[in-house]
Amino acid sequence: MLELKEVHTYYGNIHALKGISLRVEKGEIVTLIGSNGAGKSTTLRTIQGINRPRSGTVLLEGTALETLPPHEIARRGVAQSPEGRLIFPRMTVLENLEMGAYTRKDKTGIKDDLERVFTLFPRLKERIGQKGGTLSGGEQQMLAMARALMARPRILLLDEPSMGLSPILVELIFDTIVTINKEGTTILLVEQNALMALSIANRGYVIQTGEIILTDTAPNLKNNEMVRKSYLGIE
Amino acid sequence: MNKGLRLALNILIAVGVIYAILLIGPVASFDIPIIAGEIAKNPLQLVQYLIIGVANGAIFALIALGYTLVYGIIELINFAHGDVFMVGVFASLTVLSLTGTLNTTNPVHIILGLVLALILAIVICAVLNAAVERLAYRRLRNAPRLAPLISAIGMSFIIENIGLIWAGQSWLVPSFGTSGGAAQKNFPDLLGTMFTSLNLNQNLFTSSGIHLRITITGLIVIVLAGVFMLGLRFFIQSTTLGKAMRATAQNRDAAKMMGIDIDTVITATFLIGGGLAGAAGLMAGLYNNTAWWFMGFRAGLFAFTAAVLGGIGNIEGAMAGGFLIGIIASFSDGYLDARWTEGWVFAILVLILMFRPTGLFGEQVGEKA
């Protein structure tokens, strides 16, 4: 469904992605794990068109995305819950969710999806009229995910959904990811919390300083010596 | 605050300090006992200045909205905006002249002419403002902040000179006996003419002894400006494009991820800001009865100060700031010395920037989580 081929992305002179190639098949949860600064978020930003690859291609069901403006990429069914959440601080929870559905015209479908995300995150329903900037970190994370879901994306990019959350909330968020996936959304999940990510993913890629150094099924990666040492903290 | 804004503000502060020193001169006219005596002797005059201030403030508020909307979206101070307002005045005058409205006393003709002038002034200024963005700002969007700031000042000069040439075309704008384009032109009090020909008194209240004169023109200006402001508020709060504008102002990357076309939003912002300046142009012409190629500088300075006073980027703040600056300017004109009004307004701008750069109403809550 989504395929990156030899993608190189730069920040000025800094070579952030050094030829990333990866694929996500329809219906999968694929995780991209790696340490801070490895290029995980840059990969997602490149897919979304916020950062432009200098070379290489990004294909969504055969369509090249790398030359399209970000809003066109969003229109083609790519949504993300970005690093830093980037919710709209002076808009209410409801307005944030409406912005998530910006590309859609089907009013009844939007209404149904609103109900759906409120079922997934009842907390957001309680906060519906509150300004996004006044929410707690966990609530903002939920809002960022819910907002991405409102686009009813073909592929959902999740950037560190566990960041800064309490263990209970992390559990909740990951359960929700599994639920969303079972309902038919393909997911590319970027995580520092490799153990959690590998426990729900089908396959995984390990990224280090802008390069994919390892890829395998999630269970195999979990048992991989190097992964256990570097990312799972297990000797 | 970003670097470019700070730099621009520092330049303004330097100019402002020089102004402030010069202000020591008119301190003589800032004589509190004399002013207090005047107010005690003639309290209705205070009401008169207040009304003039509110009407002019409504006009400043409409212009200030253009500054604040644009700043909110792309963090650029559009220094050409005051001159877009000037084009609004000239566009109105030209439409009124070409439709023969300036030479008629037929009330229907006057109303139709004014409506047409309002629509065309809005359209012309909206398109002009969007064209300025397309031409001078868009390709500099990722350039260092100073670059679009300088091109904004360049656009201001260009539009002023267009105004100068325009003012010299007597087939477009009647010369009213003045020669050349550089002189201030008369903008006829058409509403006054209309009310006279209807045998109505355009003054709602007059009293020659105590100088209080409330005109219907003033009232119409205030009401019309209020309608535009409410319309804008509704647009920003409730329409899809308005929400997209707010989203873009609050987080541009996130807005892109939502599928919002940033270029469309920016163009819409400039169209709306320009349109409001165009409407303000007709109102200012009718109310103050002058058209001058350089009037955009003063109006722009006042409106920019109003926007900063209300907290730049803050829409309600710009409206409130507009009225406040209008009233302050009117009191300065009336009780102090009209020649120093610009100085006072500039001094206010400098003081806000030094002591409360986020404006009177402070920073909006929940900026960062």
Image (spheres, rainbow, N blue to C red):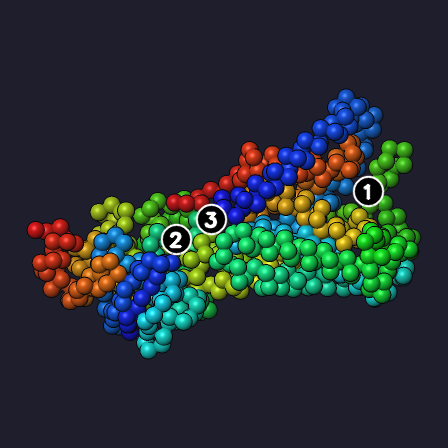
Q: Is residue B10 left or right of residue B164?
A: left
Q: Is residue B220 left or right of residue B145?
A: right
Q: Name the spot of residue A211 as percent of width and height, x first.
A: 23, 63
Q: Nearer the viewer, residue B243 or B311?
A: B311
| Residue at the image position 80 percent from the left and 29 percent from the top | B43
Q: Is residue B350 visible?
A: yes
Chain of the residue displaying label 3: A
Vertical order, B366 against B159 (above or below): above
Chain of the residue displaying label 1: B
Q: Is residue A63 left or right of residue B143?
A: left
In which quarter of the view is residue A199 placed?
A: bottom left
Real-space Cα distance between discs 2 and 1?
51 Å
SS state under label 1: strand
| Residue at the image position 47 percent from the left and 52 percent from the top | B250
| Residue identified by numbered label 2 | A86
Q: Name the spot of residue A176 as percent of width and height, x first.
A: 26, 58
Q: Nearer the viewer, residue B275 or B167?
A: B167
Question: Which label is found at residue A21?
Answer: none
Q: Is residue B49 visible?
A: no
Vertical order, A207 against B365 (above or below): below
Please, what is the three-letter code of the amino acid marked with disc 2? Leu
Q: Nearer the viewer, residue B126 or B144?
A: B144
In which quarter of the view is residue A186 placed?
A: bottom left
| Residue identified by numbered label 3 | A90
Q: Name the spot of residue B357 as percent of width and height, x first.
A: 54, 38
In this view, which residue lies farthest toward the bottom?
A62
| Residue identified by numbered label 1 | B214
Please, what is the three-letter code of the amino acid marked with disc 3? Arg
Could you tell me which quadrant the N terminus of chain A lies in?
A: bottom left
Please, what is the three-letter code of the amino acid marked with disc 1? Ile
In which quarter of the view is residue B155 placed?
A: bottom right
Q: Nearer the viewer, residue B20 or B175?
A: B20
